[in-house]
Image: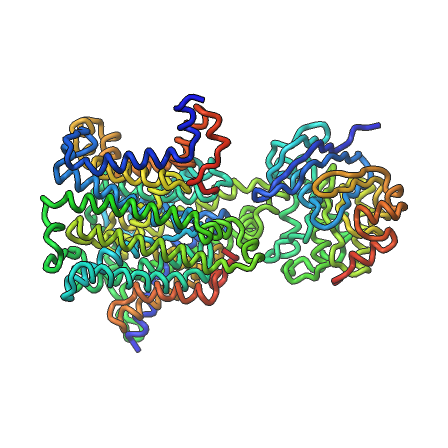
Amino acid sequence: MSTIVLLLVTGLGLGALYFLVASGLSLIYGLMDVLNFAHGSFLTIGAFAGYELSRLLGGDSWWTLIASMILGALVGALAATATELLLIRPLYKRLIEQVLVTVGLALASVALFEGIWGTDALFTQGPAFLSGTTEILGARIPNDRFLYIIVAALVLIGLIAFLKFTRYGLIIRAGVENRSMVTALGIDVRKAFTLVFAIGGAAAGLGGVLASHYFGYVSPQLGGTLLIFAFIVTVIGGLGSLAGAAIASVVVAVFQQFANFYLGGTGDLVVVLLLAGVLLVRPSGLLGKKA
Amino acid sequence: MKPPILRVDHLRATVAGQQVVEDVSLEVGTTGVTALLGRNGVGKTSTIKAILGLIERNGLIEFDGERIDREQTHRIVRRGIGYVPEDREVFSKLTVAENLRLAERDLTPNRALVEEIFPDLTARGQQAAGTLSGGQQQMVSLARALLNTNRLLLVDEPTKGLAPKIVAEVSDALARAATTVPILLVEQNLQVVRQLAETVVVVEGGRTVYSGAAHELLDNDELVMRFLGVHAADGAEQHQEGAQ
Amino acid sequence: MKLIDKAKASSATPWVVGGALVALFAVLPFLNIMIPGVLPGPTYTPGTLQVLALCMLYSSLALSYHVIFSTAGLLSFGHALYFAVGAYGLGIVLQETEFELLPAIGLTIAAAIIIAGLIGAVSLRVTGISFAMVTLAFAQAGSVLVSRNSHITGGEEGLRLSIEHVPSFLIGVMNTRNLYWIALLLLIIVFLIVTWFERSRAGHVVVATRENELRVRVIGIRPFVVKHLAFVIGATLAAVVGMLYLLLQSGAAPRITTPDFTLTILVIVVLGGVGSRWGVVVGAIIYTILDQRLTTLSGSEIIQDLPAILRIPLSEPLFILGTLFILVVIFLPGGLAGVARRATVRSNPLREVEAQPDEVKQ
C-alpha cells in the first residue's frame, strides 16, 4: 500500500513537470499548427537562468528558490517571444518551414548552451526541506514532489482562468477551433500567436527550474530529454487541449513510475507503447482536435 | 448615383492549387441586397472568401473606393464588413455569449438591436454554441455580423438546411438588416432571393455570366433553368431538402 | 542553338554529368588530389577515403529518407531506427552467430523488411502529425531497447564489429579503399532504385496520394498500399546503408538510434532541397564535410582568437549548422536544388519550359 502511495505521488510530481512543458506545446500546436521542437530549449535556458541566480544569491533559501522560479519563467517567456517574432512570424502561412526552423533552433541553441556552460552536469542546490521526506500513509515521499505538484496546479488554474476570463483567452480558445473564422471577425491572430508562445515559454522556463531540482542538476541536454516525453504527453492528451495535456501528464507519469518499479525499469518503453496504443484507438488523442 | 460600396473586377482565386474562381466581376451598391446565384460548386462561396482574403486571390477588389485585394483578412473586416459564412462556423466550445462577445469590434456594439431581433439568444447566453440547433446557430452567426456597425454584409447561404419557419425568420432578419446596410447574399432559395434582392449576379464555371435586376431574371423561367437548373417557381422546395 | 544551350536544356545532362562524376570518384583512390580545409589529406589516403565514403553513405541514407518524405509525403521522425536496425542488426548477427558475412547480410535485410513492414502497417493507420509521433515513438522504443540491453548491444559504448566472419579485404585501414568503392556502388544502386520507384506506376500513385488522397481513392486505388510500399522501400534501403556503416566505422554507436539522428537526415534533405534527388546527394556531401571539418575549424586559431561573444558560438559546429539551416529555411526554401534551378533558369529560358524529371512538385 505504501509503495502504491509513493508511486502515485512521485508519478504526480513527475507529471507536474511534464505538464509544465506540455501545456505550452499543446496550446502552440492547437492555435498555430506548429510543432515547436525548440520548446526544450526554453526549458533549458530557464533552468540555467535559475541556476545562475541561485549561485549568485546563495542556494539554500526559499527566497532564492522562488526568485529563480520567477526568473526562469521570465527568461523562458523572453526566449519564446523572441523566437516567435524573429523566426516564426516571418514564415506566416508556411507551416513546414515554421516547424523546420524550430528544429534548426533546437540544434543551434543546445550547441550554444554547451559552448557557454560546457557539456557536464552542474549540480543544483535547494532549500533543505526539499531534500527531506514526509510520511504519508506509510510512504516516505520526497518533499520536492509536493513543490512541483503545487506549482503545476497553480499554473493549470492560472491558465484556465486566463483562457476563460480574458479577451485573449477567448481569442485563443476560438482560434484553436477555427483560426480563419477568428480573422474573419476582424481579429489579428498573430498577436495571439506571440502571446501563446510567451505563455508556453514561461511555463517551460518555470518547468526547467523545477526540473533542475528534480534531477539535481542542469545541463544543456535537460530540455531535450524532457521534450520527447512532453511531445508524447501532448499527443496522447490531444493536441490543442489544455485539459488533455493535464490528464495525459498524470497518466503517462504514473504509468512510467509503476512500470519502472514493477516491470524492471521499462518505464520509457511503456510510455512509448502507450502512445502507439492511444493513437491507434483514437488518432486525435484523448481530448484533442483533429490533427 | 453613388459609387458602389464594393467593386470586384476580374477576380481569380485558387484553393490548394485549384482554380476555383476564373473571372468574376460584380458591383454592390450602397443600399439594398445583391444576390449571388449559381449552381452548386460554381465558385460563389469562393468569391466571398476571396473578397475577404481567406483564400489566394488576384484581381481588383475595391471597398468604398479603396483597394483591398492585397490586404489581410482582419484589416479588410475592420473596414466595416460583416461576414456570415456558409455552414455558420460558430465556435462550438464557446458559449453563445462568448461567441457574440468575440465578434464585437466597435466600442459600442448594437447589443440592443441584436437582443431585439434574436431574443432566444439572450436566453441561451450560457449555452455552448455546439449544442444549439442549426437554426439557432444561424442566428448566432447573423447576430455576430449585426453587432457591429458595418458598411457591407457578406452573407453565404444563410438558409441552407433550415426548416421553412426558420427560413422565414432568417429572411426577415436579413430584410431588417438590409434597411441600414447593403448585403451581398449568396442564396439558393429563390423565394428568399425574390423577397430580398434588387440585383442579381449569376456565376457559372467560376465566371460571371449575368447581372441585372432581380425580377428580370427570376421572372424568366428559361434563364433560371439555364443558369440554376431549376424552375423559377420551384426554387424554394429544392433548397429545403434535408431541412432541419 | 549552341551546344552549351542544348546541354542546359536537355534532361539527359544531369545523367551525363553524374556518370562523369561517378567515374571521377571511382578513380580518386589512385589520385593525389588535395583540397586543403575540406579533405583531411590527399585523396589516396585512408583518412580521406573514410570521409568520402561517409559522405556517400549519408547520401544514400538521405535518398532513402527522400523516398518516404519527399516522394510519399510522409513525415517520419523515426527513420534512424531502420538505419540502426541495419547497423546493430548486422553487428549482433555477426557477434552472436556463426554466419558468414553474406548470409548475415541477407538475414539482416529480411529482418529489416519484416520490421519496417510491421511498423509501417501500424503507423500508417494515422496520418500527419500523429503519424510523425508514432514513428518517433517506435524509434524511441528502439533507442531504449538498445541502451537497456547493453550486454548485447554494448550500451553507451556501442557495438564493436566482430570480424571473425568478415572477409579480410573489408577489414583494416589499408582496405578502406575497398569500402570506399562499395559505398560508391551502393550510392549508385540506391539512386537507381529511388529513380526507378519514382518513375514507376506505384511512384506516380504515391505522389498523387501525397497531393490529394481523396482523388486517388476515387479512382479505386488504396493509398495505404502505395504508402506502405514507399515506407518499406525507404526503410530497407536505410538498413542496407546501416550495414555498410557498421563495416566502415567498425562499429555502431547508440547515437544513430536517436530522434536527433533522424532530424539530422531531415536537415540534409531540406538543405539539399525537398523533392530533388541530386540536391539531396549534394546536401549530404556538404553536411558530412561540414560535420567533419567544423570540429577542426572551430578548434583552430582563427576562431580561438575571437572575442568570447563570437568565439563561443562559432566553436560549436552544431551551432553553425543549426543557424545555417535556419537561414536556408527562411531565405532559400527550395534548398540547394532551388538555388541551382533558379540559376539555370536565369541563364537559359529554355530550361524553364523543359519538364524537370527529378523534381517532384511540392
Q: Can you give x and y, in whole percent of width and height, for residue A178 in the image?
A: 58, 50
Name the residue furthest top: C2
Q: In this view, does A201 lie to the left or right of C110?
A: right
Q: Which residue is drawn at 85% across and 55% down?
A: B234
In which quadrant will I find the N terminus of chain C? top left
User: Image height check: is B129 above or below C185?
Assistant: below
Q: Quadrant of residue C229?
A: bottom left
- Count the numbered circles shown: 0
Name the residue furthest bottom: A1
Q: Can you give x and y, in whole percent of width and height, for residue A99 in the image?
A: 42, 45
User: Image height check: is B9 above or below C220?
Assistant: above
Q: Which of A186 and C64 is in front in this view?
A: C64
Answer yes or no: is residue A134 visible: no
Colour scheme in use: rainbow
Q: Is residue B78 left or right of residue A142?
A: right
Q: Quadrant of residue B207?
A: top right
Q: In this view, does B25 lie to the left or right of C304?
A: right
User: Image height check: is C255 above or below C94?
Assistant: above
Answer yes or no: is residue B179 visible: yes
Q: Quadrant of residue C58?
A: top left
Q: Can you give x and y, in whole percent of width and height, for residue C262 in the image?
A: 32, 50
Q: Which residue is drawn at 74% across and 37% down?
A: B151
Q: Residue at x 30, y 65 (%)?
A: A269
Q: Can you give x and y, in whole percent of width and height, for residue C5 in the image?
A: 42, 24
Q: Which of C1 and C240 is in front in this view?
A: C1
Q: Which of B177 and A282 is in front in this view?
A: A282
